[in-house]
Amino acid sequence: MVADRASDEALAKLAREGDTKAFEELFERYKSPILNFIYRLIGNRETAEEVTQEAFIRAYKSLGIFDPRKRFSAWIYTIARNLAKNALRDKKYFRDVSLEKAISGEGEDIKLKHVLSDPNPRPDEIALDEELSRNVQAVLKKLPAELREVITLCNIEQMTYKEASKILGVSEATVMNRLRKAKLIFMKELGIDTKSFGRDKNE
Amino acid sequence: MNNKVLENFDLIMANLKPIEASPGFDFEFRRRFEAAVRERCAETAFERIARRAVETFNSAFAPKIPVLIRSAAMFLILAVIGSGIYFAQPAKPLMLAKAQYLHIGSIVSTGNLSRLDIVLSGKYAIRLKKNTTLRVANLTPRRGRGKAVFELIEGTMLVSVEKGFKGSEFFVDTKEGSARALGTKFAVSASREEKITDVSVLEGKVEVEGGKELVLVKAGQKTEIPLGKSPLVPQRLVESEWLALEELYQIGKKPQVVLLVKNTPDRVRQLLAPCPIYITDEKPREIPKTLEEALVKIEEAIKTGDNQKHLEAIGLLERIASERPEASYATPLTLYIGAYYSYAGEPKKAIETFKGFLAEYPDSPLASIAQAAIGVIYEEDLNDEAKAKEAYSSVLNKYPNSLEAIWVEDRLKIKKLAKLPKYLAPGRVYKSEDDEHEAVYRKMLFAGRENKNFC
């Protein structure tokens, strides 16, 4: 039996009318994806947590302007994205925070290259591999912000092009193009030859 | 091979280990969230205040008109709205623009979609409504005893004569008669078709002459002058006429402290809600800085719900009002203090404040509100019917033309008929043989609801 779960938009409407429990429920649903999204963008856990909390507080304060006919997820992601961009611009944010060690140069990203080249990679192993996750983050950090965004939304968060386009405020075609470009640069960073890459299977 | 790499890439990304929030993450969020919830509850009161302030202010007051100083012989057009305005002197129509001069003999007309404000700073302000034609008949030079005479050929004009024009004379002539202002706010309408002139007075008095007869029209009254006849006996304004005159507050010098109440008979209810008080940014600034301190105190009081803080805020406001009782902000501020006392659960102090207002400002246009407020507080907060009745009677006797008189009359009528058998409870629909009886019950049902428009 499937439990009767209120939609995000219904909860947002209740929260707007003063139901704090409804907003807490929304927080529970989205805190992890938003935290990860922001972390992938800015690459620092501590700052990502701070920005995540700020995103939800801003969302709460702005409930009056949220249109329940639109998707709550797109709205909270947009707020999170904007705050993450501000955080990246604002060097103050990172001044006293220890930056994760960036992986650069040959030898340190061999594991990632190896997994990418593996004809039979195992998803369950990938999911448990922290080192691999750090490798990915390190390479992601080298990408321009707008390319990082599309990889995070489409590949990591598994959003459709349509969903991502709403958050980024661009067309689906732009999302597709950026994603292609993001993957090529990602591979180049790892020293993988991209000359004969076919089209993305999702296109 | 390369497609396989891309596939692996997608696989890696889809199965990437997510980061977990640190142990203190939820706790920290809840702390911030609770603070935001508290802030939102406090904001809600202010948002309501702001919303009501904006709604009422927008309907009662227009945006500021810039004020310029010119000689008595000519003045600038200060606000031109719409495009159908013509300037004929002697008979050559031109388009009028802001910052244009008018002279004696000028004729100004507004079209169907326009209006015009003419202001002599500190002296008087005139608004021509749509389809109005006005001629500048006479303006004496500054050196002499000032005299301004306008001929209203057709249409409606609103006039606000300021204190600075005291000692001078202001006339509006029409075909039917003439109105002389005695320091006041009033409106004159002249209809060519019906051959009749109306004069309605909001504040002060106007002496109206027609057919060699003179009548004095007081605040809250109007008269009509048919062509070739004497002015009719002044009658009390009805509610719609009061509302139409509200526009008079948009012209001329605006006060720095404004009580945001609409000019409807239930003004006293609006005041006691309590109504918001609006501080304009009219210059030169009279209101002292202590008011900011009082506003901070009020904010604290609302946030904490601490009645003691409300009383402290009232104390600060009283100090401001008593320091300069002659200042223009003192009257609205004193009324506000009375309403605030009532709100803070101090009805006796509220009555004391309103009585003090009547003693200090017996001729104020707001006096009728203070008198009616005394009645309401005796009746509803102190359950003293005898004193309430006395206060209401004073409204009818001393301020017969006021909006409060209309309100009190209605109230007393309803209360008379309200002494009916107990089984006839308000809120239920009864079949009555007497239509008037049922109509009064419906009215009582409406009047019985508390006016909580403030929150």
Image (tube, rainbow, N blue to C red):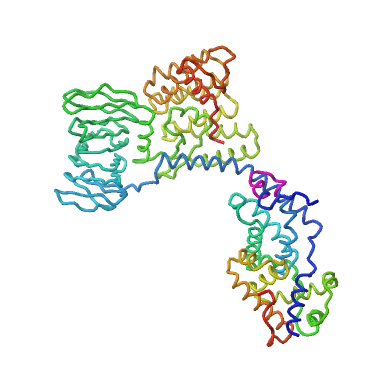
Query: To which quarter of the image does residue A77 belong?
Result: bottom right
Q: Is residue A61 above or below residue A156?
A: above
Q: Main secondary structure of the magenta part?
A: helix
Which one is nearer the viewer's eye here, B255 or B376?
Answer: B376
- Left or right: where B337 falls relative to A163: left
The x, y position of residue B311, in whole percent, is 60, 31
- Left or right: where B428 falls relative to B225: right
The x, y position of residue B435, in whole percent, is 45, 18
Residue at 64% across, 44% down:
A17
- From the image, which quarter does the C terminus of chain B lie in? top right
Q: How many marks?
A: 0
Residue at 37% across, 38% down:
B249
- From the image, which quarter does the N terminus of chain B lie in? bottom right
Tell me if residue A17 is in the magenta stretch.
Answer: yes
Residue at 28% across, 45% down:
B112
Residue at 25% across, 49% down:
B85
- On the question of residue B150 being in view, the answer is no
Tell me if residue B291 is in the magenta stretch.
Answer: no
Query: Which residues lie in the magenta part?
Result: A11-23
Q: Is residue B240 above or below residue B287?
A: above
Q: Is residue B274 above or below residue A152?
A: above
The x, y position of residue B77, in whole percent, is 27, 48
The x, y position of residue B58, in whole percent, is 44, 42
Which one is nearer the viewer's eye here, B27 or A197?
Answer: A197
Which one is nearer the viewer's eye here, A162 or B280?
Answer: A162
- On the question of residue A201 being in view, the answer is yes
